[in-house]
Amino acid sequence: MIIKKPADIRPSEITEPAIYRRRRDFIRNTTGLLLAGMTGGLPGTGAARPGHGGKVIQGIERGPFSTAEPPTPYEDVTTYNNFYEFGTDKESPARLAGSLKTEPWTVTIEGEVARPGRYPLEDLLKGQPMEERIYRMRCVEGWSMVIPWVGFPLANLIERFQPTANAKYVEFQSLHDPAQMPGQRRDVLEWPYVEGLRMDEAMHPLTILAVGLYGEVLPNQNGAPLRLVVPWKYGFKGIKSIVRMRFVERQPVSSWSRAAPHEYGFYANVNPEVSHPRWSQRRERRIGELRKRRTLMFNGYADQVAHLYRGMDLAKFY
Ligand SMILES: Nc1nc2c(c(=O)[nH]1)N[C@H]1C(S)=C(S)[C@@H](COP(=O)(O)O)O[C@H]1N2
Ligand SMILES: [Mo]
């Protein structure tokens, strides 16, 4: 999403990475099918089982709202990332995020809550269900994936802190530590990365905090140890490596709307009717597929979330 003047950008830049990876994906998928055939398995089923070398999360339950669509291969989910703290190209996070130290980790809760404080991550996770939620994810750049997250409803945590009547929004902050995050030594964005949700969006049962994917602890490049997942919004809402949650009365700023307010709004709901100023949002390329798909309103979660925006002009509040 590096901001360029319209004259600098070629339309091909957005889809280029997906195209060059097509052949590789085709080869891999074909191999997968062969293996599945040999073992009697079906492609897509059991894909969310661990076995990729990360720390396995115990006691995972099947959560609600999962799509039956096949998950995007683990290798794509973990090597094609946006995490500007580790560079602006898709491959850098996987290469460089090893320097991120995720233990110990504390999250500061502040603002309009009865129980503010600095909470160790273990404490926040205590008593939370660990659910697998296989969600469709859509990046504003025009690609999409299906990711088997492991996490728990954000609402569970929020209730614990007892927000006051003045809490209308939640603001999230990522870690700011240029010593660990080489991308922060350049000012491609104002650091730390910040995002926000309206309280009803934050409390919605689709909204989760993820600590894992494919049955294992989150790889650093995917936002370890704690990241937000809001599947009806463009991917940039899904802030990674969260260290702070602040409950506020006014709509907070978010990194991308601060960097380019005409291109990225606060709501960032997936909406094929609202073009990005430099490209259409009508279609998307599911990583690993050859033909583009039609993008669905609210990324296919309209039945669950459309009521949150009743009466709002979604072309204005994009
Ligand atoms: N802190 C932080 N969070 C971030 C980003 C980032 O650069 N920094 N990129 C966002 C964007 S644009 C996307 S599409 C998703 C990508 O998540 P994934 O790499 O796990 O698929 O993370 C989002 N969260
Ligand atoms: Mo994105």
Image (tube, rainbow, N blue to C red):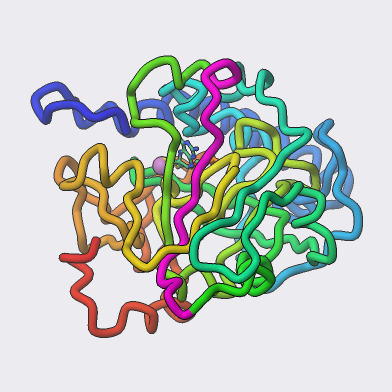
Residue 94 appears left or right of 169: right
Q: Nearer the viewer, residue 57 or 128?
A: 128
Q: Position of residue 94 (x, y in %)?
A: 61, 23
Query: Which of the image's four quarters has the N terminus?
Result: top left
Residue 178 among magenta residues = yes
Res 177 quadrant in image? top right
Residue 163 among magenta residues = no
Q: Position of residue 86 (x, y in %)?
A: 51, 22
Magenta region, mostly helix, strand or loop? loop
Residue 66 in view, yes or no? no
- Count of labels shown? 0
Residue 180, above or below 245: above
- At a point 66% along the width and 55% down the height, the residue shown is 117
Q: Nearer the viewer, residue 281 or 105?
A: 105
Q: Nearer the viewer, residue 192 or 66?
A: 192
Residue 65, above or below 173: below
Query: Which of the image's four quarters has the C terminus?
Result: bottom left
Q: Residue furthest left?
A: 7
- At a point 29% along the width and 62% down the height, the residue shown is 271
Residue 262 appears left or right of 259: left
Q: Position of residue 227 (x, y in %)?
A: 60, 48
Q: Position of residue 297 (x, y in %)?
A: 35, 68
- At a point 20% along the width and 59% down the height, the residue shown is 274
Q: Which residues are magenta?
A: 165-181
Residue 252 in view, yes or no? yes
Residue 230 appears left or right of 292: right
Residue 21, above or below 224: above
